[in-house]
Image (spheres, rainbow, N blue to C red):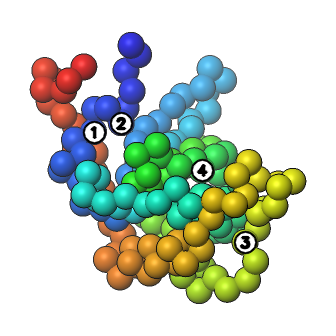
Amino acid sequence: MAKVESFNLDHTKVRAPYVRVAGKHLTPSGDTITKFDLRLAQPNQEYLGTGTMHTLEHLLAGNLRDHLTGIIDISPMGCRTGFYMVMDGEQNPEDVKLALEKTLVFVRDFDTVLPGVSELECGNYRDHNLQNAKDWARKVLEQGLIVQETVRIPDGVSSQ
Ligand SMILES: [Zn+2]
């Protein structure tokens, strides 16, 4: 199997909520792509419901782009503890942290119609939970985001 960055992260040694540079990729044409781990829930201790993740995905997709340029993609993690964000260029995690804080304030205070929620625009438009998304945004803001360094699992310890 190919090496997967997140399988080398020691999930017991991180402190969520956080922003972490998960990796940098140099394209054949010489451009840098930066991947971020936006972790909302403490791994293996808590996780978000699918409707909560889905609602956050819709709100993050638009609002984070209002605060950051160069976002290629924001996608939910399968473990439902956070999101990955892929960006053009070298990016400063402190800038991402500030932008995510602004977006979480936006989510916490959100009180209108969710964007993109219809049978036409979404692949599972019934599976949303705005109240839980707002509650998670409030919880993360109260806990306070940090910039988390990567803590690698030592060679020979992982299950691979
Ligand atoms: Zn959707």
Which mark is on residue 74?
4
CA separation in Å, label 4 and label 3: 17 Å
Image x and y of residue 68, in percent: 63, 62
Q: Residue at x 87, y 53 (%)?
A: 120
Q: CA distance from mark 2 to mark 1?
A: 5 Å
Circle 1 — which element?
A: loop
- Upstream in the sequence, badge 1 or badge 3? 1
Q: Reply above or below: 74 against 129.
A: above
Is there any visible trace of residue 99 in the rendered image? no
Residue wearing tag 2: 6
Rendered-image quadrant of the C terminus:
top left
| Percent x, y of residue 145 | 36, 70
Assess whether mark 4 and mark 2 are in contact (beta carbons under 8 angstroms).
no
In this rendering, the label closer to the viewer, 3 or 2: 3
Q: Which of the two discs, 3 and 2, labels the residue nearer the N terminus?
A: 2
Q: Do the CB atoms of the residues marked 4 and 3 lie less than 8 Å apart?
A: no
- Disc number at residue 114? 3
Tags 2 and 1 in contact by the CB under 8 Å rule?
A: yes
The kind of secondary structure element at disc 2 is helix
Q: State the CA–CA distance, disc 1 to disc 4.
A: 20 Å
Please name the amino acid that badge 2 sits on: Ser
Q: Is residue 146 something that shows in the picture?
A: yes
Q: Is disc 4 placed on a helix, strand or loop?
A: strand
